[in-house]
Amino acid sequence: MTVQAIDSDTETLHKLGYAQELLRKMGGFSNFAVSFTIISILSGCLTAYGTAMFNGGPVDMNIGWPLVGIMVIIVGLAMAEVCSSYPTAGGLYYWSAKLGGKNGPAWSWFTGWFNLLGQVAVTAGIDGGLALFASAFMNNWFGYPLNAPHILLVYAVALFLHGLLNTFGVRLVALLNDISVWWHILGVVVIVALLVIVPKHHQSVSFIFTSFQNGSGASFPGSIIYVFLIGLLLAQYTFTGYDASAHMTEETRNAAVAGPRGIVMSIVVSLIAGWVLLIGVTSAIQNYGAESASVVPAAQIFIDAAGGGLGQFLLLIAIGAQFYCGMSSVTANSRMIYAFSRDGAVPGHRLWSKINKRTRTPTNSIWLATVLAFILWLPYLYNPNAYAAVISIAVIGLYIAYGIPILLRLRAGDSFQRGPWHLGKWSRPIGTIAVVWIGLISILFVLPTIFPVTLGNFNYTIVAVGVVAGGTSLWWVLSARHWFKGPRIQGTAEELASIEAGFVGTPAPVPAVSAG
């Protein structure tokens, strides 16, 4: 008899309990490109630049960046090892379920909800930054108002376009992500080159690496250390979203190796390119006080340093990168929602776990991701510090979700079944450092960023994180612990093949059998 043998990726997915519903067309470079695009140094570094100008200044940007980058590489290495063992779209919460033993469902539940919070906040932060830069560009071009309602309008349009692009299918998203990598690399080269060549005045090396600024209003003993630490938000926020490589593994070939490599390499390349970018922008500062007080400080630095025409050209480069970044963030966000819904954890899960049979993408989850991100940005209408709060929520939500499976992998010790990509004897020291660092930043970024604290400048990160932590805890105790058993197995190998047969134009792979 003649049978169609399943490939190794699909076989691995079947062993994890899932059918190959999503279209597996991404190569290793595209998987790396998704995470690199979401990290997006031209988004995170530039949109959070103003936050760092007030909290720490150049020393935070250019000394804090490599410090945080090294710690993030350690976190990424620990995550990548687990990803290699469990290459599935559920990513972090699936890992927690498998590593958590008898308490796996509880670990999975909380990991999933923090991951969902972080993913939504990252999307909001990225497209919020895009809206700020696009509004600044239009303000210079034809006087577009730089007030909260008009910026929110641009934000809504950006989210809609990203939802639309993701609806068209994974092939288009993969192509745009591949283009995005080169856009980012060449964009950094162009921006830095013009900022070095064009301005008549540049800041000194001493200013770039040692100048400290405290615009927070903090004046208590130890405030210098305090401000430096909270100023690390620029770097820590930029280094988020690289779990996207894990969420895209069900659409990636050779996923058990390509996914881990995508995580680690996206961090390493971003560390190098981002440091070059930050040094270049800082050197081009012309009027620190005026530029830090503008609505979009990095955009104002471009205009002041390179002039109106060239400055707007640099803005366009950044806006393009931010647009790619937002698109990829919606991709990763929707896959996480899809996977979590597939396992019954999200209200309305049957709706969000549906796959569009024509495009083989989770269309409903894509649009839910955009709506939730829009809601999270609404406080910007009355709180000018909402952007800092949103990116703090992103950091804490995601890094708690990163830290839980790393901690569980440490607990598992030698019983952990390694995949083809692993850390060997370095697993324990790398995992330990990663968990300690995550604990530190989870405390740092709920702290006040402006003094004295008022309702108008309140860092509402603690509220958002507290609502998710408290709400999901209550839900777990009262209800979910009775029915949420972690990731659901979709069926036997034959049942999985039957699910796969339901997609238009896709023959159902079946387990390889010997003729007899």
Image (cartoon, rainbow, N blue to C red):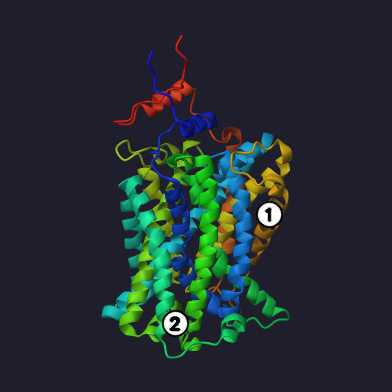
Q: Which mark is residue 69?
A: none
Of all residues shown, which one is farthest toward the bottom? 200
Which residue sits at x=36%, y=45%?
Answer: 170
- Label 1: how many residues lie within 10 Å, few (<14), some (14-19) or many (20+)? many
Name the one closer to the observer, 92 or 468: 92
Which residue sits at x=60%, y=59%?
Answer: 72
Question: Is residue 407 at all visible to an observer of this figure?
Answer: yes
Which residue sits at x=39%, y=71%?
Answer: 132
Name the one closer to the observer, 413 or 216: 413
Q: Is residue 499 above or below residue 436?
A: above
Going from the N terminus, do you reach mark 1 or mark 2 first? 2
Of all residues shown, which one is farthest toward the left? 142
Horizontal side of 290 relative to 414 (left or right) equals left
Q: Which residue position is annotated with label 2?
A: 196
Q: Is residue 43 above or below residue 290?
A: above
Q: Position of residue 130 (x, y in %)?
A: 39, 67
Q: Position of residue 505 (x, y in %)?
A: 29, 31
Q: Position of residue 474 (x, y in %)?
A: 61, 46
Horizontal side of 271 relative to 71 (left or right) equals left
Indicate the quadrant where residue 271 lies. Answer: bottom right
Secondary structure of the residue carrying numbered label 2: helix
Quadrant location of the N terminus? top left
Secondary structure of the residue carrying numbered label 1: helix
- Label 2: how many residues lie within 10 Å, few (<14), some (14-19) or many (20+)? some
Name the one closer to the observer, 195 or 225: 195
Residue type, numbered disc 2: Val
Report if the CB atoms under discs 1 and 2 are less than 8 Å apart: no
Q: Which residue position is annotated with label 1?
A: 435
Q: Nearer the viewer, mark 1 or mark 2?
A: 2
Indicate the quadrant where residue 499 lies. Answer: top left
